[in-house]
Amino acid sequence: MLITTKYYDVPTKLDPNGSPVRIFVISPSVQNYPQAKFPGVIVFSEIYQVTGPVERFAGQIASHGYVVACPSVYHEFEGPEAIPYDVEGTDRGNKYKIEKRVEAYDEDATLATDLLMSLENCTGRIGATGMCLGGHLAFRAAFDPRVLASVCFFATDIHSATLGRGKNDDTLVRVRNGDLAGKGELVMIFGKQDTHVPRIGRDLIRTTLDDANVTASFLEVQAQHAFIRDEHSKGRWDAALTRSLFTFMMEVFERTMGRDLGPRGGSSGAPEHIC
């Protein structure tokens, strides 16, 4: 399926400079069907904003029949351009990550969801995904009842509660308080060799989700951090594993928001005994 790309500069309320958040939107394009509608997916980027690898990842989702929104979340500090994958860029991205307020990250997610739901070519059924910082933001997007599924790749700072200004986020606190109860499906994907999220941190996230009775899948694979990044990956990119997990993600999206299932009910209506 062919895709087109445009962007929207959306006003924010929490940016002290009054700067809008630029949201890149990648849409499927089906010839001779100008009124076609598709589900929406928010793709949250790593600390480098919307880089080539992030745009290509988002484009692949769009080509499967989804309208994809990619917010540039560092609008408080600089323009929407991608931050380089080098030492200076990494330091800059990590600096912004803990200077931005957590509630401002949440506002960006809300605005991206609002935008998708306002688009004529979107059905209003929304999912989210992201990597690294973006994995954490996709996790927090799941608190919004409009987000029906979140697939989080190697989400950082959840286990340590160190996202945002003051390095004291409330992500797992909200899970314990039941803020994900009855919400969409959550998928957590981590590499076992990921030094950013050690085993004790992964165990904490998994246990917290289980104890809160969240509808969640937890995958641990033989990979390092950023294994899905196809550029400047420091030798960590695993194309075959990425393809496999991308397929898994698309199954989740297709099942949860890829089609309109009607109102949710309490019974499947299936017979009690099936051989």
Image (spheres, rainbow, N blue to C red):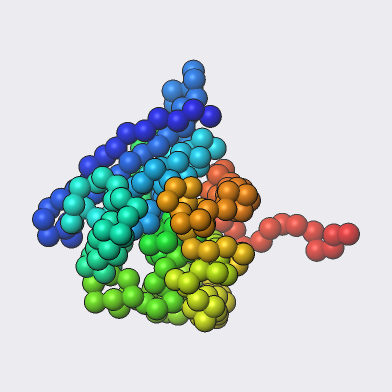
* Residue at 55% in and 44% down: 258
Closest to the observer: 253 or 93? 93
**Quadrant in the picture for the C terminus:** bottom right
- Does the rendering let one see residue 265? yes
Residue 194's place in the image compared with 49, above or below, is below
* Residue at 25% in and 66% down: 95
Residue 113, x across and y down, in percent: 36, 50
Closest to the observer: 17 or 55? 55
Closest to the observer: 18 or 58? 58
* Residue at 39% in and 53% down: 44
Left or right of 233: which side holds 100?
A: left
Q: Quadrant of residue 58?
A: top left
Closest to the observer: 90 or 136? 90
Count of marks overlaid on the render: 0
- Does the rendering let one see residue 101? no
Left or right of 103: which side holds 239?
A: right
Residue lying furthest left: 17
* Residue at 38% in and 53% down: 45
Residue 89, x across and y down, in percent: 28, 56
Residue 11's place in the image compared with 190, above or below, is above
Residue 131, x across and y down, in percent: 44, 57
Residue lying furthest right: 275
Residue 79, x across and y down, in percent: 20, 47
